Amino acid sequence: MAQTSVKAVKPNVWQRLVRYTNDVKAEMRRVVWPTRAEIINSSWIVVITLAIFIVLIFFLDEASTIVVKFLASVRP
């Protein structure tokens, strides 16, 4: 019993590149871009969150430094 397989012809590299580029262009037309106000608002949220984490990490670092210095100064 002989099997017949139909092998699809693979497009060459240039045809695939052109298809890929066209697909990317089509997708980019569908993107809903944020407004300027949304970008500014989101940026402020990121900056404020970053500042909060910087302060939090600073105080945790200072507290851990104090604890380690205290433990190092205690002699058994």
Image: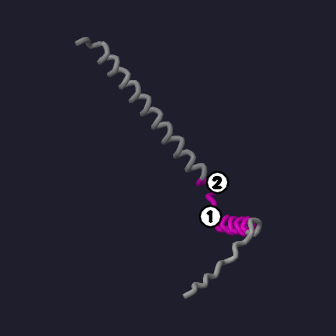
Most frequent secondary structure within the magenta stretch = helix
Q: Residue at (31%, 15%) from the top-left corner?
A: 72
Secondary structure at numbered mark 2:
helix
Q: Mark 2 touching mark 1, by CB under 8 A?
A: no
User: Which is more toward the observer, 65 or 22?
Assistant: 22
Instruction: Tell me the tag on residue 21.
Output: none
Instruction: Tell me the tag on residue 32.
Output: 1
- In the orientation shown, which residue stands out farthest toward the front? 1
Q: Residue at (53%, 45%) from the top-left corner?
A: 46
- With respect to residue 46, does 58 lie above or below? above
Q: Is residue 56 left or right of residue 12?
A: left
User: Which is more toward the observer, 24 or 17?
Assistant: 17
User: Which is more toward the observer, 44 or 60?
Assistant: 60
- In the orientation shown, which residue stands out farthest toward the bottom? 1
User: Dividing the image into 4 quarters, which one contains the N terminus?
Assistant: bottom right
User: Dividing the image into 4 quarters, which one contains the C terminus?
Assistant: top left
Q: Which residues are magenta?
A: 16-38
Residue 8, percent from left and from top:
66, 78
Q: Is residue 72 left or right of residue 32?
A: left
Q: Residue at (57%, 86%) from the top-left corner?
A: 2
Secondary structure at numbered mark 1:
loop
Amino acid type at circle 2 is: Arg
Circle 2 or circle 1, nearest the eye: 1
Q: Which residue is mark 2?
A: 36
